């Protein structure tokens, strides 16, 4: 009998996506809303799209290209990220809310030659094209909204034959993550494949959380490590929240059993859930009401990015929903 590979022992993103496609296959990697309803991409599709984008990059920009990326948390962003790092490229995630002028400077400092963007950042795209001639390749991840002088991500991956290429070394640079700039000008933190894979696997929770609510931005270290990397390591399904104002409705739509969040979101959800429990106090117990409020399957929150108040943590645990509190720097 064939032994299932231990996903926690993998050291590169390419090994991770290759093995995930083999082990999890048609399991949903990501679910997201469309005008027609909830759509999904499988682990097999993720590998195919990442391989095709890797092949395109090797041809258009060469090995170890630095690729700046800006856009919402979406499947195309994730597939592009894996395509970049799997072939030895270096991803440079940018904060969507940052000013265009600052992002232009960060792109220049990171020696970027490829820019991946969405239709909400056309002004940034135009500034980079006008002022940074070293950036030669532009790829838009917004389906159907690509400028005439840029490449469409979906069309590119669908029309690029995948070629064979070796995996980068575990200690190879794979991302430059900029700090938020709270202590001055943003600093570019250089992270390797092994940095990300180690961060995603060194803590293993005992909860059976196979459907994760995704409300964190992918450009942030917590979202990129926890929501994307750890999802793939454990073959989970990431259910994308498109807007925080829809978060409670999305719980009832996707019925996740876990999520990653920052303290502000944890506090907001607790207040809303307790109001609902108070309204239902004659019909069910508080733990039953809180579970029902979140769609009936919710078990766990992993909270990070900043310290979580102990009383709030304890209050969550009293409802029967576990909270793991962690805090780390980029």
Image (tube, rainbow, N blue to C red):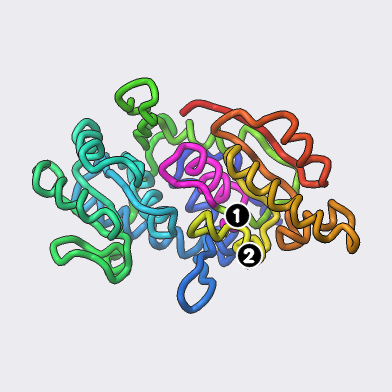
Residue visible at 47% across and 43% down?
Answer: 224
Left or right placement of residue 96 versus residue 204 in this view:
left
- Which quadrant: the N terminus? bottom right
For label 2, the residue is: 254
Res 256 seen here = yes
Q: Is residue 194 above or below residue 269?
A: above
State the SS at label 1.
strand
Residue visible at 89% across and 63% down?
Answer: 283
State the SS at label 2.
helix
**Residue 326, image x, y percentages:** 63, 31
Task: Choose top left, top right, bottom left or bottom right for residue 24.
Answer: bottom right
Question: Is residue 114 within the magenta segment?
Answer: no
Q: Is residue 197 above or below residue 157?
A: above
The span picked out in magenta is 215-238
Q: Are marks 1 and 2 in contact (CB under 8 Å)?
A: yes
Residue visible at 33% across and 25% down?
Answer: 187
Q: Nearer the viewer, residue 185 or 190?
A: 185
Sequence order check: which comes first, mark 1 or mark 2? 1
For label 1, the residue is: 213
Residue visible at 67% across and 55% down?
Answer: 210
Q: Is residue 192 above or below residue 212?
A: above
Label 1 and label 2: CA atoms lie apart by 8 Å
**Residue 65, image x, y percentages:** 24, 42
**Residue 305, image x, y percentages:** 54, 33
């Amino acid at each position: 009998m064939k032994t299932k590979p231990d996903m926690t022992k993998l050291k590169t993103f390419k090994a991770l996506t290759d093995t995930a496609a083999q082990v999890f296959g048609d399991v949903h990697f990501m679910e997201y809303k469309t005008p027609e309803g909830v759509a999904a991409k499988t682990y097999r599709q993720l590998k195919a799209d990442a391989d095709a984008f890797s092949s395109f990059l090797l041809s258009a920009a060469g090995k170890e290209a630095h690729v700046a990326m800006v856009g919402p948390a979406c499947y195309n962003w994730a597939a592009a990220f894996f395509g970049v790092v799997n072939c030895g490229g270096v991803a440079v995630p940018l904060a969507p809310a940052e000013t265009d002028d600052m992002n232009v400077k960060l792109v220049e400092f990171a020696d970027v030659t490829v820019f991946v963007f969405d239709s909400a950042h056309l002004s940034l795209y135009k500034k980079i094209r006008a002022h940074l001639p070293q950036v030669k390749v532009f790829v838009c991840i917004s389906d159907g909204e690509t400028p005439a002088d840029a490449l469409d991500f979906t069309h590119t991956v669908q029309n690029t034959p995948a070629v064979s290429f070796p995996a980068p070394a575990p200690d190879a640079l794979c991302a430059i993550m900029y700090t938020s700039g709270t202590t001055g000008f943003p600093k570019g933190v250089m992270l390797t494949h092994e940095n990300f894979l180690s961060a995603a696997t060194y803590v293993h929770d005992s909860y059976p959380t196979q459907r994760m609510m995704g409300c964190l931005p992918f450009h942030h270290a917590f979202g990129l490590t926890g929501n994307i990397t750890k999802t793939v390591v454990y073959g989970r399904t990431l259910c994308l929240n498109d807007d925080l104002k829809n978060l409670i409705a999305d719980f009832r739509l996707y019925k996740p059993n876990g999520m990653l969040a920052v303290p502000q979101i944890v506090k907001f959800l607790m207040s809303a859930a307790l109001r609902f429990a108070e309204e239902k106090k004659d019909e069910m117990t508080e733990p039953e009401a809180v579970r029902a409020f979140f769609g009936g399957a919710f078990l766990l929150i992993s909270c990070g990015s900043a310290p979580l108040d102990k009383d709030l943590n304890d209050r969550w645990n009293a409802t029967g929903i576990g909270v793991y509190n962690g805090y780390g720097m980029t």
